[in-house]
Image (spheres, rainbow, N blue to C red):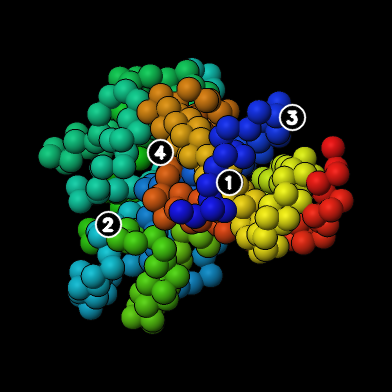
Amino acid sequence: MNTEYFIARRIAIKSERTFSKLIVRIAISGVMLSLAVMMLSVAIIKGFKTEIQEKVRGYVGDVRIFKLDLNNSFELTPFVPSSKTISDLKNNKNIVYFQSYATKPAIISANEEVEGINFKGIDRNFNWAYITKHLVTGRTIDFTDSVKATKEIMISAFTANRLKLKTGDTFIMYFVQNPPRKRPFKIVGIYDIGVEEIDKGFVLGDINIIRRLNNWEPDQIGGIEIRLKNFSQLQPVSDEIYANLEIKLKSESVQEYFPNIFTWLSLLDINTKVLLILMMIVGVINMITALLIMILERTNMIGMLKAFGMTDYSVMKVFLYNAVYLVGIGLLLGNVLGLGLGFIQQFTHVFKLNQSSYYLSYVPIEFHLTDVLLLNLATLVICLVVLIVPSMLVSRVSPLKAIRFK
């Protein structure tokens, strides 16, 4: 029989002292709340980063290729990609797909309202998976009929609300050039990305409109959007793409295109680290306080055990076993609370956000088994290592004085 474990179990479970029970409950609650808050913090931050990254990269791609020049306007300089460039992109195993596009500044006039936008021209090879996911009403542009496609357009819910437009409405768009050119369009679909920089700045239409307005050749484009398989490999893959480009082209990653958004996301990591440290300190302080009080309250028992021949190390093990038990209960309850609240939010989206401020309409949750296991292990190890110091107080207890202690 493990004597130390038996005594620790009796202290933890069958203690008759009301004050000890209160301290034990406070210690367990401290560990439980600390772990739950840490788990939810990591899950929310990872959910935020994933959701916002997906919103941005889904619309503009992970890497953009365009012509190398001094053009800093919204309208990209046309070029025809070489067969080598297309072949390199097709053979790159890190690329899921790539698609051509072009942009041109324009002004929408509707319902006595005016809105400046950036017309994004796409073709029949455009990947609609992302836009379809965020489609509010209507459908995507029908490229099976080339004539019909040039008259169809998709706008964001942000632009639709500002101009009081809906699916099926028509309006006049004035393209910025000398002289200005106007074209009528019919709204076939309204989408809601949730990122204001995108929603208020872009509409989707046929790239052939830009080609005709600018007198481009049929195969000229403004740029190429590339979607990668693994976003964590963005920088090395982006560098690889850039190194293989022909001399007249350059590339830009989505992090360079939207620096403000990705800088904000990187700052969230710092907030998470600070919160994890604070919550770990709270949990450790709770356990230290509980252990110290239990040692002081059990001074008479410590004296008796020492009088019966138990060594300081054995008595210390009694209280460490007790601490392990309390931390274990706290971890179990913390997992139930943290994972429970997380899964409820994940499936119900009960906690809402202001989408204009946070780019999301609800608090996102993204659990990873590795994060959960590491947080549990780190909490257990740190608590036990820190608790070794207060448990060493038993060596200072004199058996004679302790037995007299009431």
Residue matched to label 3: 19
Crowd rating for badge 2 (residues with CA inside 10 Å; few <14, some 14–19, many 20+): some
Distance Cα–Cα, label 3 vs label 4: 67 Å
Q: Earlier in the sequence, mark 1 or mark 2?
A: 1
Q: CA distance from mark 4 to mark 1?
A: 72 Å
Badge number at residue 7 = 1
Q: Amino acid at mark 1?
A: Ile
Which residue is drawn at the image coordinates 46% and 58% (left, top)?
Answer: 254
Residue 392 quadrant = bottom right
> Mark 2 = which residue?
99
Give the mark nearer the N terminus: 3 vs 2: 3
Q: Is residue 296 left or right of residue 187?
A: right
Q: CA distance from mark 4 to mark 2?
A: 17 Å
| Residue 16 visible here | yes
Q: Nearer the viewer, residue 356 or 365?
A: 365
Residue depicted at x 47% and y 18% = 164
- Which residue has dot 4 on it? 203
310 or 224, nearer to the observer: 310
The secondary structure type at the circle numbered 4 is strand
Give amino acid for label 2. Answer: Gln
Q: Earlier in the sequence, mark 4 or mark 1?
A: 1
Find residue 383 and report its horizontal and vertical position in percent: 63, 54
Tell which tag, 3 or 4, sits nearer the viewer: 3
Going by the numbered disc 4, the residue's amino acid type is Val
Sequence-wise, which precedes: disc 3 or disc 4? 3
Height in image: 36 above or below 318? above
Element under label 3? helix
Determine the secondary structure under disc 1: helix
Closer to the camera, 233 or 65? Answer: 233
